[in-house]
């Protein structure tokens, strides 16, 4: 999303699978455009209600989200694909914590 040219030249995510605690949770189908795309889900993880009580008492433990790119829109020049940003909006989930370990497509790990 750095520029229109960079966006056109590189591959873009078309279909993205989300895993919640290593279980498939949803498949997102993204449009091939540079606009923000939003998806709504019911609360997951350690979400709290307006009174501070846990919404999902049985899930009040550490939890994970993983993302798997299933399909891409081809770029004009390059075959690589990157996700520049993922925003979370809701209770208790706003961003990755510092030093989050991310599994790359080739099986290596990178810390963000």
Image (spheres, rainbow, N blue to C red):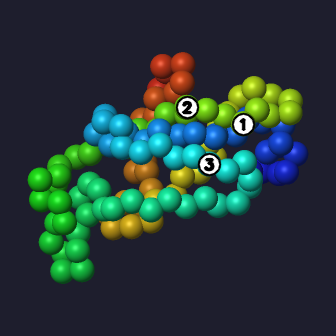
Q: Upstream in the sequence, badge 3 or badge 1? A: 3
What is the C-alpha distance between the residues marked 2 and 3?
11 Å
Q: Residue at x 61, y 59 (%)?
A: 37
Indicate the quadrant where residue 24 lies: top left
Residue 17: x, y in percent? 47, 38
Q: State the residue position of label 1.
A: 73
Q: Upstream in the sequence, badge 2 or badge 3? A: 3
Of residues 12 and 14, the one nearer the viewer is 14
- What numbered label is drawn on residue 30? 3
Indicate the quadrant where residue 55 lies: bottom left
- What numbered label is drawn on residue 85? none
Q: State the residue position of label 2.
A: 70
Q: How many C-alpha atoms fall within 10 Å of the one at disc 2: few (<14), some, or many (≥20)?
A: few
- Secondary element under disc 1, as helix, strand or loop, is strand
Direction bottom: furthest residue = 51
Of residues 34 and 107, the one nearer the viewer is 34
Residue 28: x, y in percent? 52, 47
In the picture shown, does residue 50 fall above or below 90? below
Residue 56: x, y in percent? 17, 60
Q: Residue at x 54, y 19 (%)?
A: 106
What is the C-alpha distance between the residues marked 3 and 1?
10 Å
In the picture shown, does residue 51 fall above or below 30? below
Q: How many C-alpha atoms fall within 10 Å of the one at disc 3: few (<14), some, or many (≥20)?
A: some
What is the C-alpha distance between the residues marked 2 and 1?
11 Å
Q: Residue at x 86, y 30 (%)?
A: 77
- Look at the image and tell me whether residue 110 can be seen: no
């Amino acid at each position: 999303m750095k520029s229109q040219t960079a966006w056109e030249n590189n591959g873009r995510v078309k279909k993205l699978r989300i895993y919640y605690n290593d279980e498939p949770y949803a498949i997102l189908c993204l449009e091939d455009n540079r606009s923000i795309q939003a998806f709504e889900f019911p609360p997951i993880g350690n979400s709290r209600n307006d009174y501070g009580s846990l919404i999902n008492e049985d899930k009040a433990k550490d939890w994970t989200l993983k993302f798997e790119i299933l399909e891409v829109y081809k770029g004009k020049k390059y075959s690589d694909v990157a996700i520049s940003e993922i925003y979370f909006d809701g209770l208790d989930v706003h961003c990755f914590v510092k030093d989050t370990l991310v599994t790359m497509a080739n099986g290596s790990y990178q810390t963000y």
